[in-house]
Each structure stands twice: as C-alpha cells, then as structure tokens.
Image: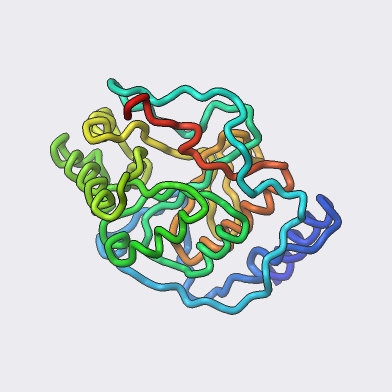
C-alpha cells in the first residue's frame, strides 16, 4: 500500500510539471529486504560497518526517463564570478555555497555499498558528484569510484577509519584526515581538496589538521537523501547553493532519482561544487 501511494505521488508530481513520461521512482523500485533503517543524516556506524564491503543486489529496471526540460545535465557553471578558497589560515566550514545560480551540489560519503546502477545513472544524466571516502572501501575497489565521478567531481578524504574526530588529539586527527588524502593521491594524480568529517562532527583542530595537508574547505550539508526522499534542513524545497548529503548505501540509486525529479521540478542543475570552490592561485 505504501509503495503504491508513493509511486502515485511521484507520477502526479512529474505529470504536473511537464505532462510527460513518468519517472519510475521511489518505493515501487525499492526492495524491502536488506534495507537499513536510517535515522538522521549521519547515522552512527559501528567499527565493523566502517570497513564492511557489500555489493548491492540489483534488479533489471525499465530505463529511467526525466522530462526533457530538466536541467540536470552540466551547463556552463558558474555563471558569475567566484572567490577562490583561501591559501592559508582557517579552513572555511560550509553547508551551502553563496550563489544565485540555479544549482545544487551532490556529495556521497563512505563507500561501503557499491551499486553498479549508480555510475550508470550519473552518466546517463551527466551528473557530477563529489565523493568523501574512507580507506577500506576506496582501496577495495577504486575503479568503481572513478566510474562514479566520470561525469565530473573529485574523490576526497572522509578520514581513514570513519572515526569521530573530536575524540582524537590534533596529531591523531591529522593522521586520519591527511592519511586518507595521501591514500587517494596514490591512485589519482590530484586528490580532492575538500574534506567532510564523519558524522558531521568537527572542531578547530579538525580545520587546522585539514589545512595542513592541502585541504581548503570542510563541507557539511543543507539537505540529505534517505530512503528515496529528500530531507530539508530548512523549508520544503531545495535552495540554490545547497550541498546535498548522501551515502553509498542500498538506497543511493533511489535517492539520486528523487533528487533528479526535484531538480526537474525546480529547474535546478546539479553542478560540480569544485567549480564554485576553486583552489587559490598556485594551489
């Protein structure tokens, strides 16, 4: 019953927007078995879950179709001038990007579950994604994550072990943050220059540690994707410049579909956040 109601709601939203083909989305495409109940944007994870690698089972689905007027593909963004990140000093902490461009930014954390449909969906709609990964998942299958960012984006540190950084001293924080960036750098010519703290918990030592090894900004979020739905921190729709949190979990494929629908309804583009957070000159 729930799945039928959700399917009908999505069909109505897309039809009202464009009167075109319905996007198959939501609970009607989600298998209930094996789903993890998520409470909040960053559910606490046990040490075992941080390194467990599970490849999600997939089901053959009909092709996804969005209204042809959707703006999910990359355009010539940004339209206006942007200010490079600072070269030195305090690393800024951001949950939104100050812009009037009709853009939002997709970020994906952790890496434990690698659904092969996800890179296919991102490639289909040319959606860039900024990844924040941990050591275990990244080293297990780096090629998968390279395929996820084939349409744009970077791979960035999310610490080596997904630990809560505020429980660590400054040296240990640096080892977690910078050590993961070094690992990424062993597989890519240029590792990402952004960072996200596990559970969204950080302090001044976190910013100092991040800034010591080439990281220029710490990112939080202003909306989150869970269970095929968008959770807003403010209001009931996306805002230009929103940083959107998601995770490599069983629901990621459905979450991205939900985001694509909402972007189509609001006339928004999923843009590469790196274009709005450029490195300083010579950085």
Name the image quarter holding the C terminus: top left
The residue lying at 27 percent from left, 34 percent from top is 214
Across and down, in percent, residue 39 comes to 47, 54
Given residues 226 and 135, the one toward you in this image is 135
Q: Position of residue 242 (x, y in %)?
A: 56, 37
Residue at position x 59%, y 59% in the image:
228
Horizontal side, residue 4 vs residue 244: left or right: right
Q: Does residue 205 sit above or below 14 in this rendering?
A: above
x then y, percent, for residue 146: 40, 58
Q: Count all numbered tags in the image, as a single digit.
A: 0
Name the image colouring: rainbow
Foreground of the two, 79 or 221: 79
Residue at x 37% of width, y 32% of height: 217
Instruction: Say left or right for 219 vs 66.
Output: left
Q: As drawn, is 68 to the left or to the right of 256?
A: right
The answer to whether residue 99 is above or below residue 197 is above
Residue at (67%, 70%) from the top-left corner?
63
Give the quarter of the figure containing the N terminus: bottom right
Q: Position of residue 66 (x, y in %)?
A: 72, 58
Q: Nearer the viewer, residue 47 or 239?
A: 239
Residue 169, located in which quarter of the rendered image?
top left
219 above or below 29?
above
């Amino acid at each position: 019953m729930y799945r039928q109601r959700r399917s009908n709601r999505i069909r109505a939203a897309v039809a009202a927007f464009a009167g075109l083909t319905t996007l198959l989305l939501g609970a009607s495409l989600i298998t209930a078995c094996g789903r993890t109940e998520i409470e909040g944007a960053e559910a606490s994870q046990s040490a075992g879950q941080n390194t467990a690698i599970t490849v999600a089972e997939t089901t053959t689905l009909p092709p996804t179709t969005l209204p042809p007027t959707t703006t999910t593909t990359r355009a010539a963004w940004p339209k206006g001038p942007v200010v490079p990140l600072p070269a030195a000093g305090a690393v800024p902490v951001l949950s939104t990007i100050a812009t009037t461009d009709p853009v939002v930014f997709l970020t994906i954390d952790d890496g434990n579950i690698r659904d092969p449909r996800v890179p296919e969906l991102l490639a289909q709609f040319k959606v860039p994604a900024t990844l924040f990964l941990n050591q275990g998942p990244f080293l297990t299958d780096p090629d998968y994550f390279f395929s996820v960012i084939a349409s744009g984006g970077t791979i960035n540190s999310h610490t080596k072990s997904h630990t809560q950084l505020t429980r660590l001293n400054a040296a240990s924080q640096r080892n977690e943050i910078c050590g993961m960036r070094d690992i990424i750098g062993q597989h890519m010519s240029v590792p990402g220059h952004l960072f996200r703290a596990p559970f969204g918990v950080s302090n001044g030592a976190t910013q100092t540690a991040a800034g010591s090894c080439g990281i220029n900004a710490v990112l939080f979020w202003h909306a989150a994707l869970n269970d095929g739905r968008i959770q807003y921190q403010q209001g009931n729709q996306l805002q230009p410049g929103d940083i959107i949190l998601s995770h490599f979990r069983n629901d990621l494929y459905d979450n991205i579909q939900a985001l694509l629908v909402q972007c189509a309804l609001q006339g928004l583009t999923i843009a590469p956040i790196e274009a709005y957070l450029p490195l300083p000159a010579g950085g």
